[in-house]
Image: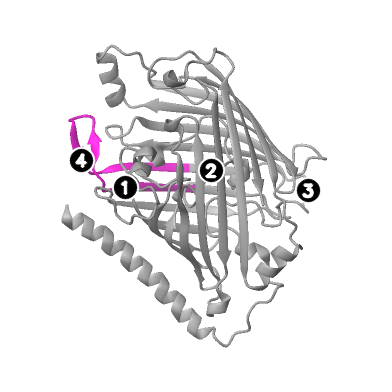
């Protein structure tokens, strides 16, 4: 046990030293380079290096040419503030009491989130192609299992590029759900999935918004649009998000007792859309956790929890070569996790979505998704033996429309038909309406 803990400390500590040493070397060689001016591209200060992307910093309620933005930009800094409110309710059944709900929308569900993000390009320290990202998070939910409720650190990391963007490194505190797998529809946080969502990587310990964990991620961009990515992250608590928050209220604890090393691997092919080519993105990977999880097959705490994933998205149409990202896309996902450790052990998704579905709605996204999730027999069999009703699997169909209401304003509306919305009890089929409003300042 002490050996595993020492291995975690050593791996992450060496990783941090490596990136800081590389950054320092570049800083020394760039001390005589001219410092960027106010003309520095604002987007260089946006979220960098992840599988998911945030909307452009120019897509904001605060004018990019305002004195506030220009003053920060002249110093190589940016400040973004994100606010989101969500609501969900099952329309097929009467609401149950708050203390009896089994799934999101069983009782009217509400959530709210506020997320300030500060970034700096570090040119005043002589660093080039680098970024410091610091942010906090307040997240509130009306039903704790859909949470957790938090008020803590979200990100505190250094991002650095080497070799003309061939190598990218992130070291510090972060959420890996934006770094690996790319589960967001269209790869953007502004058009995320409505309805049933793949949770298998989170079961295996991946840090997910709004939770953070110390980690080190390395991405190598190869020839012909290929890439490989590896990560070392301190695992979240084996009991899930609420347990992680209960043990680490600030998010800053480096190594809570029992949380060991999670290794993440991903390889892919990602060709961006252009005037001559349509977008294609394939990625596949593997997660392995050395944290002790309850082995439901023998009732003992054991290591070895793991998951694998493969996703692909292809652009079918490109109606306007001057706006190559617009058009119709088709995508699919397949994920698997160790059945003896995880309640959800198989996940499959098919998705069809379109950017700019109407000529006058260039910033909107419409999507149709179908999902199928299998529930582990090691979790359902004991429930049946105890006299409880269960769903052995679940399926859903979700239609959603994401409206770009105004600069920095997004309204997302979705309707999901779900068969098997909870593992237990065996609830009736649901028709869940979900709405979210997100503002980027």
Residue 103 in percent (x, y) is at: 46, 24
Q: Please tell me whether mark 3 sits on a helix, a strand or a loop.
A: loop
Where residue 379 appears, as percent x and y from the top left, is 29, 25
Q: Is residue 398 left or right of residue 13?
A: right
Measuring 78% from the left and 54% from the top, which residue is drawn there? 322
Which residue is label 3 attached to? Answer: 320
Mark closer to the observer (3, 1): 1
The answer to whether mark 2 and mark 1 are in CB contact below 8 A is no
Residue range corresponding to the magenta coloring: 283-310
Q: Does the magenta stretch mainly form a helix, a strand or a loop?
A: strand
- At a point 29% along the width and 15% down the height, the residue shown is 384
Q: Identify residue for label 1.
A: 288
Q: Nearer the viewer, mark 4 or mark 2?
A: 4
Image quadrant in which you'd find residue 144: top left
Q: In whole angstroms, how far apart are the C-alphas of marks 2 and 3?
A: 23 Å
Q: Position of residue 258 (x, y in %)?
A: 24, 47
Asked if the residue under mark 3 is in contact with the one under mark 2, i.e. CB atoms within 8 Å, the reply is: no
| Disc 3/disc 1 C-alpha distance (Å) | 43 Å
Q: Is residue 248 left or right of residue 6?
A: right
* Mark 1, secondary structure of its residue: strand
């Amino acid at each position: 046990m002490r050996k595993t803990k020492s291995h975690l400390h050593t791996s992450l500590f060496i990783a941090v030293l490596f990136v800081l040493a590389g950054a320092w070397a570049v800083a020394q060689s760039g001390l005589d380079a001219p410092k960027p001016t106010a003309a520095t591209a604002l987007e260089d200060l946006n979220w960098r290096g992840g599988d998911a992307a945030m909307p452009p910093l120019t897509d904001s309620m605060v004018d990019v040419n305002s004195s506030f933005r220009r003053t920060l930009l002249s110093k190589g800094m940016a400040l973004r503030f994100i606010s989101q409110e969500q609501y969900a309710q099952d329309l097929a059944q009467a609401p149950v009491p708050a203390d009896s709900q089994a799934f999101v929308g069983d009782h009217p569900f509400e959530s709210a989130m506020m997320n300030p993000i500060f970034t700096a390009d570090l040119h005043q320290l002589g660093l080039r192609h680098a970024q410091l990202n610091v942010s906090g998070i307040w997240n509130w939910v009306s039903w704790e299992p859909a949470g957790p409720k938090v008020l803590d650190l979200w990100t505190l990391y250094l991002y650095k590029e080497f070799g003309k963007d061939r190598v990218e490194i992130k070291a510090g505190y972060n959420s890996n759900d934006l770094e690996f797998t790319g589960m967001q529809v269209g790869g953007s946080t502004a058009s995320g999935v409505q309805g049933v969502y793949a949770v298998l990587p989170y079961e295996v310990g991946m840090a997910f918004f709004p939770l953070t964990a110390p980690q080190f991620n390395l991405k190598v961009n190869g020839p012909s649009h290929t890439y490989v990515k590896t990560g070392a992250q301190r695992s979240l608590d084996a009991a899930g998000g609420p347990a992680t928050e209960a043990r680490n209220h600030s998010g800053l604890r480096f190594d809570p007792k029992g949380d060991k090393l999670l290794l993440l691997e991903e390889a892919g092919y990602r060709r961006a859309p252009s005037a001559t080519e349509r977008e294609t993105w394939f990625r596949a990977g593997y997660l392995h956790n050395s944290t002790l999880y309850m082995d439901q097959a023998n009732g003992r705490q054991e290591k070895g929890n793991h998951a694998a994933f493969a996703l692909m998205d292809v652009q079918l149409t490109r109606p306007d070569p001057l706006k190559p990202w617009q058009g119709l896309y088709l995508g699919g996902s397949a994920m698997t996790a160790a059945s003896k450790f995880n309640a959800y052990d198989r996940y499959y998704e098919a998705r069809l979505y379109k950017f700019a579905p109407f000529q006058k709605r260039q910033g909107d996204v419409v999507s149709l998704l179908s999902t199928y999730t299998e529930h582990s027999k090691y979790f359902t069999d004991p429930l049946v033996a105890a006299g409880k009703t269960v769903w052995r699997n679940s399926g859903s169909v979700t239609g959603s429309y994401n409206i770009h209401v105004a600069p920095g304003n997004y309204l997302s509306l979705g309707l999901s038909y779900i068969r098997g919305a909870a593992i237990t009890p065996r609830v009736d089929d649901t028709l869940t309406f979900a709405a979210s409003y997100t503002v980027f300042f």
